Amino acid sequence: MWRSLWPTIDRFSLHHFRYIVNQLREIRVVDKRNREVVLDLLQSIVEIVTYGDRHDPAIFECFMEFQVLAEFVRILKIGGNSGIEAALLQYLSIMIQNVENEHAIYYCFSNGYINSVISHHYEFDGGDLIPYYVSFLRTVSGKIGRDTICLLVKVHQDTAISLPLYDEALKFANHGEKMIQIAVRALTLNIYSVADEMVYQFLTTPTASAYFSSLILNLKNKCLHVDAIINGVKESFHEKKRELLSETDRILDDFYYLKDILCIPEQRLNKLVTENIVNMLILPMLLTLLNNRLSNDTGLSAITCLYVLCRLLQVFDGTNLVNVIGSAVLFSFMPPNVTDAAESVVSARLEQVNGLAVCYQEGEEMVDLQHEGAENFMMNYVLKHSLEFTELSSCFDSSPLENSENEWGGIFSCIFSRNHSLMLGSLMLLFTVADSKDLHYQLAAKIGFSQVKTASEMIGSTVAGHIQKIVNQLLKVLASEPPLSVPILLHAAWFLRKLLVFLDQKLEDNDCHLFKTSYEGSCGRLYEEFDRCWFDYIPDVLKSEWANCKTALEESSQSKDPFFLLELASIQNPPSVFYLTSQAIPVLLLIGNGWLIVSSYLAQSGKRYPSDLSLASFGSEVALGSGIPCKIAFSGAGTRDIYVIPIAREISGKLLLVERHPLHSRKGVVIAIAPLAGLDPKIDEEHPTWLLVHLRDFEPRLRSDETKTLDSHTSLPEQGRWILGFLSAKDCKAAFSVILEETRKQRSFVENLVAPVLEEKLFK
């Protein structure tokens, strides 16, 4: 009753706002005793200002009149060790984020209040203040525009000397917390997008531009870490792969961040970033490859260089970086022995590659960067020099190939290397350059692009005369003895398939022989699997692996992940069960005439032909039929009288141990089941009435390294066998013969099912 007589307070009214502000202005010290009171006042102010921005302009007029932001700064300074900084930064972030009136935003950024909050001395050691501080900086950056960013710049004699928002944020650029790194990068992109002439002059000063150099140096350190992981000793493949994926993801994040910077339409910024990428990252890596070294002066391996360059080309679409790399790769086609002075030519080639970066600067000095068509002029200027450089290798284009692979220089020495990872990596780089849609038409013409053909169909006039040699090299990999690991074979088949498209499926006699050798070897090793315990799973694995390989081989070079280079360099997978199947599939996929037969096989391999016995499970009733009586002793269950019934129906094969039904003399109950494949029955030499059969799992197990392959030589556990005791040696031999016969029937069906895929007529 009395409450109805008490006047209500409108907490969003102008009167209440003035009252709250006056309460805040009376605060002279902030400590743990009044900390909560101060925070309540700050929260109320932020809520009322946010409300007033949308509904009552008078509130923000009062906000400016009382200079409330100055009060925030004052509270921050007298806060001492009260721990008020995090909450104050959070409230400021909320207010700035929700204020939409341009006049209000302009006021918030003027008078140096925001800069005072940014430049305040915070104690970041320990605690959770950093996330609040960085979040505040990011919020401010999201509200700045070309008309307001100048309010945050410190100027001396008409020259920008500092941008606290940018300077303070970069101190956390390499913070260990991922979200903080993301916030800092988002902040920098916001600044780059709205920077005016004065701000860009500041960003390009040696002090501020050092950030870009630092960014590339950190990127190189990550590449070195990748090398360390590759060469390190880990307990398992999975552990090493997980570390490689984590580190390469960090490299990709850097690439996409740099790409975002280059997408900002500001020539000075693009020039600064491009020069750092070219001079500090691309050229050192290219020199490693052109100089035919396994590592450069910084210790970065050629494999990692190839991975990084391929990834860079895939990420930085729409830029001229592909033309820098493409030009350098083009120079490297010159073998050292085609000139009288090999060393001088190699030295000149390296100078030419270094000169590419200088060409960009020279071109920019010759034209007005803002003038329409300036970029095309620059590119033509650079390519003019590039094409002049390639004239040195003109004699190579018409020269015969040398037989000795050791005489090749540049990237060809990698392509014809005995190191399969290096060979595949250099081919990957070549294909990625050739498939880039941003490759300049003059370079594309020199490499051999046709405007009619797709990139994957043409590697180039400079390379075209040597494709047959590369095909031969790849076929040697597929036909190698002993066989190489499945990943190497699969990726070699990918490159071979691309080149066969270029050659229109035409091979020389020697290459056809290698192709046939590879095919026959794969088929022969697949047939060897029929003598092992997992032959009944060959059709299923062949079917699943076929789909996987088909998808992998049809992948374009722009979408193909070059991560496989790092895997091949660090892990050499040993042969495993169905390794042979996996090896056969890439070769079969290269044979166009086999598709119809293979499709028919795949449809048939999915069928099952069940029967009552083949569907029998533990506890089910089955007819005893021709079962052979015997005894078996189970641990803890004593000796039991049973019947042995081996049964093979199409692809399914089981050995049933059946106990006579207590009520039906002609029926029994299944008490144990074992796969028919892998039983390997043997009659004990000392006890001719004993039959020993080995057991395997019903489902194949993946290798511990999680490579999705199976171990064909997995030893069975000691308890993985049954000893069956028969009434006579004759019964024992009969059971032995029946098991072998049913196994033969199962194997015969599997062989007939797989045979159409392996018929030699696929070749013709």
Image (cartoon, helix red, strand yellow):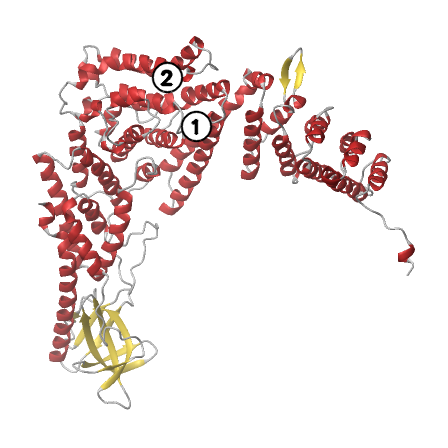
Is there CB contact under 8 Å for labels 2 and 1? no
The total of numbered circles placed on residues is 2
Residue 291 in view: no
| Image x and y of residue 750, in percent | 17, 61
Which residue is found at the position 23% from the left and 71% from the top?
610
Q: Is residue 569 above or below residue 727?
A: above
Image disc number at residue 654 = none
Helix, strand or loop status at disc 2: helix
Depth check, mark 2 against mark 1: the one in front is 2
Specify few, some or many for label 1: CA neighbours under 10 Å numbering under 14, 14-19, or 20 or more.
some
| Image x and y of residue 207, in percent | 57, 18
Residue bearing mark 2: 379
Which residue is found at the position 20% from the left and 71% from the top?
692
Q: Earlier in the sequence, mark 2 or mark 1?
A: 1
Q: Quadrant of the C terminus?
A: top left
| Image x and y of residue 623, in percent | 22, 82
Q: Nearer the viewer, residue 312 or 244?
A: 312
Q: Quadrant of the N terminus?
A: bottom right
Q: Is residue 134 above or below residue 715?
A: above
Q: Nearer the viewer, residue 474 or 403?
A: 474
Q: Amino acid at mark 2?
A: Met
Which residue is found at the position 35% from the left and 21% from the top?
324
The quarter holding residue 158 reads top right
| Image x and y of residue 419, in percent | 25, 33
Q: Is residue 484 above or below residue 285?
A: below
Helix, strand or loop status at disc 1: helix
Separation of residues labelled 2 and 1 (CA atoms): 27 Å
Q: Amino acid at mark 1?
A: Lys
Is 689 left or right of 79, judged from the image as shown? left
Residue bearing mark 1: 220
Is 369 left or right of 712, judged from the image as shown? right
